[in-house]
Structures are given as C-alpha cells and as structure tokens.
Image (cartoon, rainbow, N blue to C red):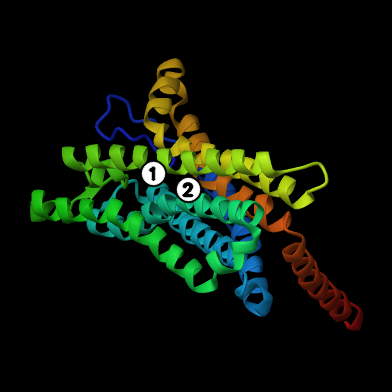
Amino acid sequence: MNLTPRESNVTGAVNYRDTFVMAVCKNVIVVVLGIAINYINATMVHTFNRHHIFKMNPRFILFIHLVVNNIIQLTTSITLCIFTYTFHTIHVSLCCLFILPAILTTQNYPLNLAFMAAECYVAVCIPLRYNHICTVKRTYIVIGIVWTLSSLSVLPDVFILLATEPPEFLNSRVLCLRDTVFRNTYSLKKRDASHILFLVAVWLTLFYTYFRILFVAKAADADAKKARNTIILHGFQVLLCMMVYVEPMLRQVLIYMFPRGVVAINFVIFIINQILPRFLSPIVYGVREKTFRKYIQKYLCTVNCHSNTTHLKK
C-alpha cells in the first residue's frame, strides 16, 4: 500500500521531483480535499451522536464505523503525504506511527463493506429474523472482528521487523512506504496473501448477497431494490479498494509508458486510492439513506439559519 504520492523506488536511477510551486499546489489540493471530506464525515458523526435512534440501529452503527475509519485513514495518509513532500525521508520509528493506523484502516474498509452487505441481505432476505440476528451487541462484536482481522494481517510485520532488522534501521531515514519499512521477504509475501484472502472473502460476500437480494427483489418491493442498488455501490467501492492492491503493477506500467510523468502518475494514483473512496462513502451510503439524510438536512438548516440570524443582527 502506498500512502504518499511519491516515487516508490528510492534508489532508482532518476529521482523526479516537483518544483516548489507545483509541490505547494499539490499539497494545497490534498489538504483542501481532506478538510472538506472530513468536515462532511465529522458532520455525520455529530448527527449520529446527537440522535439515539441511530445508536440502536446496526445499519447506522456499521456506517458510522466506516465514516470514523475513513477519518483516521484520510488524516494519517494526508499527514504522511505532507511530511514526505516536506522532508522526503523520515525516521523509520516515526514512519511506523503513521503507517500502521493507515494500513489498519485501509484493511478495515472492504471488510466493513462486506458486513454492511451482509446486513442488507438479512434485512431483505430474512426480515423476520433481522432483530434476532442484527443486534447492537453483535454489531459491536462485528466491529471488533474487523479490527482483529486487520490487526492479524499487519502486526506480524512489526514482529518480523523487530526480529530481522538491526537496531540502527529504526533510527535510519527512509521514504515512508510500507514496502520500505516492512521490507522482509516474508512480510511482502504475507501482505500479498492477506490481500488476496481479504478480497476473495469480500467479493464472495458481495456476490452472494447481491444475487440473493436480486432473486427476492420485486418491482413493488422498493426496499429490496434499494438494498440491491446499495450492494452494487459497495461493489464499486471495493473496486476502488482493489486499486491499492494492484497499485505497484499499475504504477510500473504507467511509468514505462510515460517515463517523464512519474510525479504526476504518483499524485493521481494517490488521489484515486486514498481520497476518492473516502469522498464517495458518505455520498453512497449516508446521503442515500432517507432517515440519515433528514437529520443531516435538519442539522445543516439549523446551522445556516443560526448563521443568517447572527449576520442579520450584526
């Protein structure tokens, strides 16, 4: 997983660098997008916390977990992006503090989508057992499972790093990428294996739930059709997630085709991999949900009305 729009080959023959103006412009774009997306996500978290109706609904609990996960991922990846543009290399120990939460939240993303699809399946295909299967307690257990699975995928890399690398490596400066920090062959093979395992499990879940809901959905059943469309959108989000896993191969192909466009290619891939999926999540699920949308509109209306009243008083 690449968290920065930089050349991944530190020891390459040519080190393409942005001009100062271009670097500032790219960082401004990234920061503005990050602030805007996190503002939308923070508004959704605030709406969730203010209304008890959401805290008792497994669907909204899973969704808000996805939103919080995105806030952490986006914040860490953009911070790391700025650090890399500013300092180019940082100490391995400091890099681990940023890269570990970024990797964990990136791994959580498709797993969370899979459980959200499973919740849609239960709601449409087994509605009479929904309240028994999808409880608040079990939803939090599911969230714990998501974090446990992603941790089991990442934490072994830390132990391999401590066991195989000399102490001097932790104090050395590197370009902060997963492959430059966890560079042991076993870590690389384990990373590829865990990616394949997660993707296969997520895609099987999405396909199974989609086709089961497709068979249940009827023309008059608006809820079933909505659930089916939601899972299609989840599938599109997972496709965006897959870009992270095919990123090294994609980068090599594009750099081979456009050798002078290394910096632009890395920046575009960073936007597509790290920012675009976090921009789509609140739109795909939160805004489409009528109940959630109603409360968000009410909250935004209250803020706007208050601002207008304050302005008129002045």
Which circle's residue, 2 or 1, is located before the other in the chain? 2
Q: Camera-side residue: 260 or 209?
A: 209
Q: Is residue 151 visible?
A: yes
Q: Are marks 2 and 1 in contact (CB under 8 Å)?
A: yes
Q: Toward which corner of the image does residue 141 lie, by quadrant?
A: bottom left
Where does residue 81 sit, x and y in percent of width and height? 43, 49
Residue type, mark 2 in image: Pro
Q: Mark 1 highlights which residue? A: 198
Residue type, mark 1 in image: Phe
Q: Residue at x 55, y 47 (%)?
A: 275
Q: Toward which corner of the image does residue 179 lie, by quadrant?
A: top left
Q: Residue at x 40, y 36 (%)?
A: 245
Whether residue 140 sits left or right of residue 14 in the image: it is right
Q: Residue at x 9, y 56 (%)?
A: 167
Count how many numbered circles sit on residues in the image: 2
Label 2 crowd bin: few (<14), some (14–19), many (20+), radius 10 Å: many
Q: Camera-side residue: 136 or 99?
A: 136
Where does residue 217 sit, x and y in percent of width and height? 72, 43
Q: Mark 2 highlights which residue? A: 110
